[in-house]
Amino acid sequence: MESRTGRLNQRYNSKGERLVAGVVPLTEDKNYVMLIRSTRRKGWVLPKGGWETDEECQAAAQREAWEEAGILVQIDFDLGDIVETRPPKAPSKTKTREKALYRFYEATVTSEENDWPEKSKRQRQWMTFEVAYDALKERPELQEALNRSTMKR
């Protein structure tokens, strides 16, 4: 699998929302979900990232799981679209942050790799539903993806 950086081939919808693909990565018994540390904030997040123009959404979700969490996953089913609820940040001279439209997939982790592209930037951790839900409290769109999964509560 090839790691990618930048937003040159990033997809946007007709509303200008950045299209983001992600996974809710579960153990086979559905007792645990893997979260990763955000590189921009101090909190935990689900593996996710930009869906690029030359790939299918599912493939983008699998690629992001490998790049960010070092996991190989089997996609089990589509959890649907989730609109970002955070307001866009105020534009600066160098950057703007557009809203995102997320597409999450429930996935079973088939392998945890020892080396992966963002290993030096991220921690990964298995969590129960309750612990993960609390860890995602600043990100309601990620909580919604977790809620839509069949993870044991």
Image (cartoon, grey):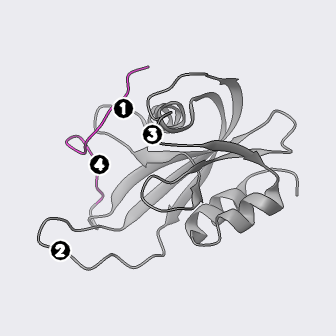
Report helix, strand or loop for mark 1.
loop
CB contact under 8 Å: marks 1 and 3:
yes
Q: Is residue 11 magenta?
A: yes
Position of residue 30 measured from the top left corner of the image (x, y, whole percent): 83, 42
Residue range (magenta):
1-13
Position of residue 146 measured from the top left corner of the image (x, y, whole percent): 69, 57
Q: CA distance from mark 4 to mark 1?
A: 10 Å
**To which residue does mark 2 refer?**
92
Which quadrant of the figure has residue 26?
Answer: top right
**Left or right, 117 with reference to 104:** left
**To which residue does mark 3 refer?**
57
Position of residue 42 measured from the top left corner of the image (x, y, whole percent): 53, 62
Which quadrant of the figure has residue 126?
Answer: top right
Mark nearest the camera among 1 and 2 is 2
Q: CA distance from mark 3 to mark 2?
A: 30 Å
Q: Earlier in the sequence, mark 1 or mark 2?
A: 1
Front residue (pair 89, 56): 89
CB contact under 8 Å: marks 2 and 4:
no
Front residue (pair 112, 30): 112
Report helix, strand or loop for mark 4.
loop
Image point (48%, 37%), residue name: 64
**Left or right, 92 with reference to 15:** left
The quadrant of the picture occupied by the N terminus is top left
**To which residue does mark 4 refer?**
11
Q: For the residue marked with disc 3, what is the amino acid?
A: Cys
Image point (38%, 22%), residue name: 2
**To which residue does mark 1 refer?**
55
Which quadrant of the figure has residue 94?
Answer: bottom left
